[in-house]
């Protein structure tokens, strides 16, 4: 077992811990102290001089389409799956994957195999069972059984609402799904969250409000994404976040989406905090490897780009430039998703937590990345890459 000792880093856990030495051993954080000295111990030791650098938890991205998502321009526009370095080089050490619009040519079993591959290559992976439509696609025939029996499945999603591509679910259908996912989570010690894709329909989050008003289901069972899609949706999301729901902002975007009214993730975070939402209930996801369609003024598809995981880190830098504090930004890109999804050893720097760490310059540029104690990025360069 090799040990890594990071010396003199400014540690944000996410709360500031001050200047510390941090020891990584056996894939975990073994010790944090003002001074740790192992020279002369005879142990195989890798020492990193982190003078003037910031040590933060590895980023947790709660929505990536690891095996590719979408392809709304026909088969030739099906987006490709991710490689290890797409995440690790951008500081992301944990991804949670969903299918997406296409649950016909893309399958949960294929996504699960990809999740095992990425885990083998170095990062941590989890998945949502289900898909855009209801009844949800599953492996075992039941959302509840998938969550209980398949280790990587921690909830259900992306279930689409307020979208012309959804299956137009009723409140009762959504309530039953959320209840099943919750019981599956309770019995297996997982979050059992219902992760919701919110489209650009005028009903926005109304369906979730109806479910909570008329069924024995709480806001905390839902985790909606793309809440920064428009100003009106953002304001609706802020209202529900004030009632205990965690809301997620998408960082992959393009100039056209922003010109059509999307609010950047960084500005959404700033505005939600200013409206009094606790900084524990706001997250960023990249929507990496989803399709980003571009339409002309006649509504015809003229281009299709792919969501990038690296946009998570870019949005974090934008948020810092807007004056949001580093602990609040770290919560948005790491800690809060881990807590909402009950990934207990992720999203924080503490003794016993997984040694998922990012060492950055004072400008938050990425220097070194470790995932479960193994270094994947060194001096800004990916030193471990996917097999293909
Ligand atoms: Zn989506």
Image: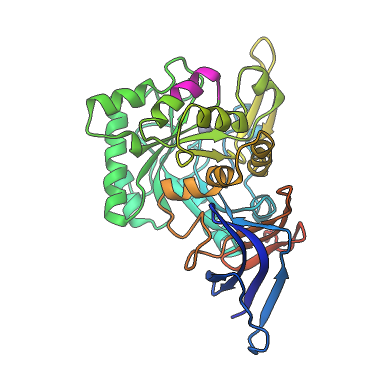
* Residue that appears at 33% across and 24% down: 209
User: Percent x, y for residue 244?
Assistant: 36, 35
User: Percent x, y for residue 367?
Assistant: 73, 57
Residue 36 shown left or right of residue 156 in the figure: right
Q: Is residue 101 visible?
A: no
Q: Quadrant of the N terminus?
A: bottom right
User: Magenta residues?
Assistant: 229-237
240 above or below 61? above
Magenta: main secondary structure equals: helix
* Residue that appears at 62% across and 74% down: 35
Q: Is residue 341 rendered magenta in the image?
A: no
Q: Is residue 232 rendered magenta in the image?
A: yes
Q: Nearer the viewer, residue 141 or 223?
A: 223
278 above or below 114? above
Q: Nearer the viewer, residue 366 or 15?
A: 15
Q: Nearer the viewer, residue 247 or 291?
A: 247
User: Percent x, y for residue 263?
Assistant: 60, 24
Q: Quadrant of the C terminus?
A: bottom right
Q: Is residue 93 visible?
A: yes
* Residue that appears at 64% across and 13% down: 299
Q: How many marks?
A: 0
118 above or below 181? below
Residue 309, picture quadrant: top right
Q: Nearer the viewer, residue 30 or 102?
A: 30
* Residue that appears at 55% across and 20% down: 230
């Amino acid at each position: 077992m090799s040990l890594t000792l990071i010396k003199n880093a400014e540690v944000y856990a996410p709360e500031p811990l001050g200047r510390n030495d941090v020891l990584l051993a056996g894939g975990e954080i073994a010790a944090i102290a003002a001074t740790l000295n192992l020279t002369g111990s005879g142990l195989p030791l890798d020492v990193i001089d982190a003078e003037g650098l910031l040590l933060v938890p590895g980023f947790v991205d709660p929505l990536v389409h690891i095996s590719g998502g979408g392809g709304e321009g026909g088969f030739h526009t099906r987006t490709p799956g991710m490689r290890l370095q797409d995440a690790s080089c951008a500081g992301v050490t944990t991804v949670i994957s969903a299918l997406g619009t296409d649950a016909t040519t893309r399958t949960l079993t294929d996504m699960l195999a990809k999740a095992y591959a990425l885990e083998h290559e170095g990062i941590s992976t989890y998945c949502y069972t289900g898909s855009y439509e209801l009844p949800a696609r599953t492996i075992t025939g039941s959302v509840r059984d998938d969550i209980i029996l398949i280790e990587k499945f921690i909830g259900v999603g992306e279930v689409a609402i307020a979208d012309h591509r959804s299956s137009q679910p009723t409140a009762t259908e959504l309530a039953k799904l959320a209840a099943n996912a919750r019981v599956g989570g309770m019995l297996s010690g997982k979050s059992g969250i219902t992760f919701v894709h919110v489209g650009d329909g005028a009903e926005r989050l109304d369906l979730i409000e109806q479910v909570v008003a008329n069924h024995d289901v709480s806001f905390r069972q839902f985790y909606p994404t793309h809440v920064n899609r428009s100003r009106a949706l953002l304001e609706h999301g802020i209202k529900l976040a004030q009632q205990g729901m965690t809301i997620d902002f998408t960082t992959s975007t393009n100039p056209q989406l922003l010109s059509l009214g999307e609010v950047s993730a960084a500005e959404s975070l700033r505005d939600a905090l200013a409206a009094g939402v606790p900084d524990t209930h706001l997250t960023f996801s990249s929507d990496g490897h989803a399709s980003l369609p571009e339409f002309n003024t006649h509504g015809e598809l003229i281009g299709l780009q792919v969501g990038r995981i690296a946009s998570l880190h870019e949005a974090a830098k934008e948020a810092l430039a807007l004056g949001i504090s580093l602990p609040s930004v770290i919560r948005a890109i790491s800690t809060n998703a881990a807590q909402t999804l009950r990934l207990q050893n992720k999203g924080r720097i503490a003794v016993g937590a997984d040694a998922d760490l990012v060492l950055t310059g004072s400008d938050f540029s990425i220097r070194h990345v470790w995932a479960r104690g193994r270094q994947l990025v060194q001096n800004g360069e990916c030193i471990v890459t996917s097999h293909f």
